[in-house]
Amino acid sequence: MAKAAAILLVAALLGLVSASLADQGTATYYTVYTPSACYGFQDEGTMIAAASDGLWDGGRACGRMYSVSCAGGTNATPNPCKSGSVTVKIVDRCPSPGCRATLDLSEQAFNAIGNLDAGKILINYNQV
């Protein structure tokens, strides 16, 4: 019994450490996926995202994978978050000044972690 409690405690602490190591930002969503800055008209599925200038890295962000979870709302929309996380692939650039978020997720990826009515949410994200 004590061993099981110790294992649960270690697992909980690792979860806290991993959450504290996550980068924080915002996410919006888009619905037109092609052409993309990375892959042109090639279909890369629906769990995709466009990187803001801060993540774009001169195009080296193409193909990078990020685990993203909702951390809260940015407006008065009730229940902006869904539990869990989603892994997305960077396939596009969300350039300034039009980009309103750290990651511009596909509609499907955004819907997996957030309420579409919110339009913009606070996120935690890690490169995987």
Image (spheres, rainbow, N blue to C red):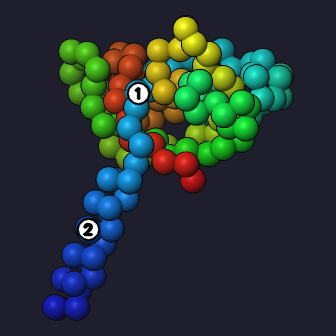
Quadrant of image for the N terminus: bottom left
Is 103 left or right of 73, judged from the image as shown? Answer: right
Q: Residues within 10 Å of mark 2 (few under 14, many from 20)?
A: few
Q: Residue at x 44, y 26 (%)?
A: 27
Q: Residues within 10 Å of mark 1 (few under 14, many from 20)?
A: many
Numbered circle sitting on residue 26: 1
Question: Horizontal and vertical percent for residue 114?
Answer: 37, 30
Q: Quadrant of residue 78?
A: top left
- Mark 2 and mark 1: span between their CA atoms? 26 Å
Is 25 left or right of 75, judged from the image as shown? Answer: right
Is 61 left or right of 119, judged from the image as shown? Answer: right
Question: Horizontal and vertical percent for residue 18?
Answer: 37, 59
Q: Residue at x 34, y 18 (%)?
A: 118
Q: Secondary structure at mark 2?
A: helix
Question: Horizontal and vertical percent for residue 56?
Answer: 64, 30
Q: Nearer the viewer, residue 81 or 10?
A: 10
Q: Residue at x 22, y 84 (%)?
A: 6
Question: Horizontal and vertical percent for residue 95?
Answer: 62, 16
Q: Secondary structure at mark 1?
A: strand
**Is 69 rendered above or below residue 121?**
below
Q: Nearer the viewer, mark 2 or mark 1?
A: 1
Badge 1 amino acid: Thr
Q: Residue at x 40, y 32 (%)?
A: 25
Q: Nearer the viewer, residue 60 or 19?
A: 60
Numbered circle sitting on residue 12: 2
Is 27 left or right of 13, judged from the image as shown? Answer: right
Badge 2 amino acid: Ala
**Is 25 rendered above or below residue 88?**
above
Which of marks 1 and 2 precedes in the sequence?
Answer: 2
